[in-house]
Amino acid sequence: MSWTPDYPRTVPERRPPGHQPRAPRWTLGFDAPASLVTSDYLALQCAGPDDPAVGPFLERVRACHTGRDGGDAPEAWELLAFTDEAGRHNLVHLGYWRDATSHARWLDTAPLPRWFAELDAAAVPFGAWHEVVQVPLDRVETIYSDPRRAFGLAACPGTRRESMTMNGYFGAARDRLPVSAIDPLEAAAPHRRRARPAASEGRRLRAECGHNTAVIRSGQYWQNAQGEQLADYTEALEPKLMAGMAHLREQADAEGTLSLRVMTSLDRETLRPLRETSVLGHFHTLAALEGWAAGHATHAAIYEHAIAKNRQYGEARTVVTWHEVFVLPRTAAFAYVNCHPATGILPYATSVLAVEPDGPAENSPAPYGG
C-alpha cells in the first residue's frame, strides 16, 4: 500500500454518484511519507542551440550528476528544449526530489545552481531563469494513461503507479488533490496582467505568483509509436493539442494563463530530440485550468480523441499521455536573469523585485564560462 495524506472531507467532491470511468487510468503512489516534493526548472535562454553559452551550461548540468558534485543530485532529471514567444532557444534542466533538504543542499553547492546564482545580469550575453515548484504532497495530483513507463515525478524511487477510478469526470483532478477535501483552493485576488512589462533585460529579478497558482506539466510520449498509431498522433491528436495550447496562449487574460511552454524532451547524452513533449503551464488558479478543460472545444477535442484511441487499442496503445499538477502556496518565487520581459510568469507576477546577488567566491571561474 502507498502512503497519501488524508483529511476528513469538508468540501464536497466533484465525482458524480456511481461514476465509473470510460477508460483505465493510473496515479502516483508514494511508499513513504514525504513533507515536500520538488520540481526544479533551471534554464538557459539564448539565441539558438549553437549559442556559445550552451556548452558551459551543459558542463555544469553534467557535473551535477557525477562524482563529488552528485551527492544531492535530483532523484530524477531530464533535459528539455523549446523556442519561446520571443524566438529565444531555452535549454532546460529539470530535476525532481522527494527530500526538500537534499534539494536545498543542491541549490547551495551544485555547479548548475551556483552558476545561476553568480551570473552578472548586466554582463552576460544570454538569459537564464530558475523556477522551483515545491509543495506539500497534499498539493500534488497525477494521472497516467499507461503505467508501464515512469514520467516526471514518477521516475523518482519510492513511487509506484496505481490503478484508480477517480478520473473521467470534470473536477477529477481537483478531487485527486488531498488538500481539496478541506480547501477550495481559491485565488486571493483577480487574474490581471501587469500594467507595465517588467524591465527585465540586464537585471536579476524575483517574481512571485499568487496563492494557489496551479502548475501543470502535461506529457505526450510517442517514441514507440509506429504505423497507424504514429500517423494518428502526428496528424490528428498533436494538431488538436497544439490548437488547445494556442488558444490558452492567445486568450491568456480570459483563461487565466500565466505562462505556457511546449517543451521537447532531449536525449541527455546526444541532445537528440525525442518523440516526447510536455506542456508546462502556470494558471491563476486550478479553477481557471478546469474552466478550459470543462468548457472549451479545444480541450474536448483532445480528450475525446485520446479516450477513443485508448479504447480502440487498449494495452496495445503506444501513445501515452499523462500529467502532474501542483497547486502552489504563496511563497513560490521564480528568478530571471537578463531575460526578455515575456519570460515565464513575468507578465502576470503579483510582485517583481530586483535582487542583489552575492558575488562569486574569490578565484572562482567566470560564471558564464568565459
Image: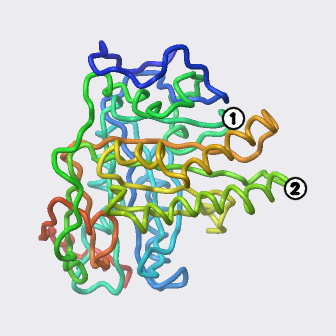
Q: Which residue is mark 1?
A: 148
Query: Disc 2 versus disc 1: distance between alpha carbons?
Result: 21 Å
Rendered-image quadrant of the C terminus: bottom left
| Residue at x 62% of width, y 45% of height | 321
Which numbered dot is residue 186?
A: none
Asked if residue 159 is positioned above or below residue 54 in the image, the reply reads above
Quarter of the figure with residue 228 = bottom right
The picture places residue 141, in percent across and down from the top left corner, at 44, 34
Of residues 266 and 340, the one drawn nearer to the viewer in this rendering: 340
Asked if residue 156 is positioned above or below residue 230 in the image, the reply reads above
Amino acid at the residue labelled 1: Arg
The picture places residue 350, in percent across and down from the top left corner, at 17, 59
Asked if the residue at tag 1 contacts the one at tag 2, i.e. Cβ–Cβ closer than 8 Å, the answer is: no
Quarter of the figure with residue 320 = top right
**Disc 2 on helix, strand or loop?**
helix
Asked if residue 59 is positioned above or below residue 33 in the image, the reply reads below
| Residue at x 12% of width, y 70% of height | 356
| Residue at x 27% of width, y 74% of height | 337
The answer to whether 9 appears left or right of 207 in the picture is right
Quarter of the figure with residue 298 = bottom right
**Disc 1 on helix, strand or loop?**
loop
Amino acid at the residue labelled 2: Gly
The answer to whether 82 appears left or right of 321 in the picture is left
| Residue at x 48% of width, y 34% of height | 170
Alpha-carbon neighbours of circle 2 within 10 Å: few (<14), some, or many (≥20)? few
Q: Earlier in the sequence, mark 2 or mark 1?
A: 1
Q: Which residue is mark 2?
A: 227
